[in-house]
Amino acid sequence: MELSIVIPLLNEKESLNELYQQIKAVVQQLQKSYEIILIDDGSSDGSEKFLLDLHEQDRNVKIIQFRKNYGKSAALAEGFARVQGEYVITMDADLQDDPQEIPRLIQKLEEGYDLVSGWKKKRYDPLSKRVPSKFFNWFVSKVAGLRLHDFNCGLKIYRKEVVKIVKLYGQLHRFIPMLAHWQGFRVSEIPVQHHPRKYGESKFGVSRFTSGLFDLITIVFLSKFKKRPLHLFGVAGLIAFLSGLAISLYLTIERIFTRSYLSNRPILFLGILLIIVGIQFVSIGLLGEMITETQTERNGLSIRKMIGFDPS
Ligand SMILES: Nc1nc2c(ncn2[C@@H]2O[C@H](COP(=O)(O)OP(=O)(O)O)[C@@H](O)[C@H]2O)c(=O)[nH]1
Ligand SMILES: [Mg+2]
């Protein structure tokens, strides 16, 4: 199998037929063997029925149907677990991504990348979405150490290894290029054609900002400090503890030598607070170290090739 096209969807009934026709035209032109995996994430608009009929007509179409809505990341993760193609393409189901871009994505991948992301250079979404998105992409670029214009474009191509290794949950689909980059995969992007939404409405509201932020904090923490949590909490704890200690010492010395009263020194409370917080941070860090210590998970090395070993 050469191509796997993975499409997570939620209530996109009106778009599905057009989407299928467009994809089919493109892959037939390419003359590659393919599968189209559609993940119906608890749709309630009759998308399910259409998908089942489609599978009856075309056995290259495979369907995963969730009983309820688990979110786009979960849908992608389930699709990724099943793909067989050497190249995996993801796209949105709402016709905003253009299947015509698939040959260009393949071409770029074959220049020697593991992941090529689409970049909606001219984007047909409301301003309320484009502006925060600019900021998001700038911020994630900084954190990731990888400059991309559009981390969260639905249209992307991957080599199979990438989707089998990168773990998705929560809202992590927004950060796939970052996760892949951190695993040592070679990531690039090309500008792609984008279209306005033709049918239905956008499925992501304001909650995209908070959930995106929390997921970002989690992965930065997990990827940088999972194996050494004390290095994060210990530093903060030490700074707090030493500052608190300095304040308390100063007050003590002052009290002994000048007979001044502590009752009118509000900074006393800061000193106490910092000492306690400092001790707590260090303790949390040590607890974290204990949890890490007991994890049996392998070293988590990302290996590109092993040559000359017997298959085991
Ligand atoms: N599996 C799954 N797909 C979803 C969910 N929400 C949206 N999608 C799909 O993700 C794609 C992009 O969603 P859309 O609402 O167009 O987001 P926007 O383009 O950022 O406004 C579409 O194909 C949706 O059907 C969800 O909860 N689960
Ligand atoms: Mg959309």
Image (tube, rainbow, N blue to C red):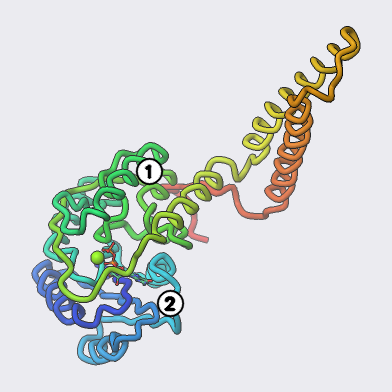
Q: Residue at x 39, y 81 (%)?
A: 42
Of the pair 27 and 48, the residue shown nearer to us: 48
Whole-percent x and y of residue 251? 81, 17
Relative to 45, is 265 on the left or the right?
right
Residue 13 x, y percent position in the rendering: 24, 82
Residue position marked by numbered label 1 in the rendering: 140
CB of mark 1 within 8 Å of CB of mark 2?
no
Return the residue nearer the eye: 111 or 168.
168
User: Which label is found at residue 69?
Assistant: 2
Mark 2 vs ligand 1: CB below 8 Å: yes
Please state the quadrant of the image where ligand 1 appears.
bottom left
Kind of element beneath mark 1: helix
Name the residue located 65 percent from the left edge and 41 percent from the top edge: 229
> Can you say whether 144 is above or below 8 in the image?
above
Amino acid residing under circle 2: Asn
| Residue 285 higher or lower than 26, as above or below | above
Badge 2 crowding class, 10 Å Cα cut-off, few under 14, some 14 to 19, many 20 or more, is: some
The reply, left or right, for residue 209 in relation to residue 270 is left
The amino acid on which the numbered mark 1 sits, given as a three-letter code, is Val
Query: Could you say which quadrant of the image residue 161 lies in?
Result: bottom left
Asked whether the viewer can see residue 30, the reply is yes
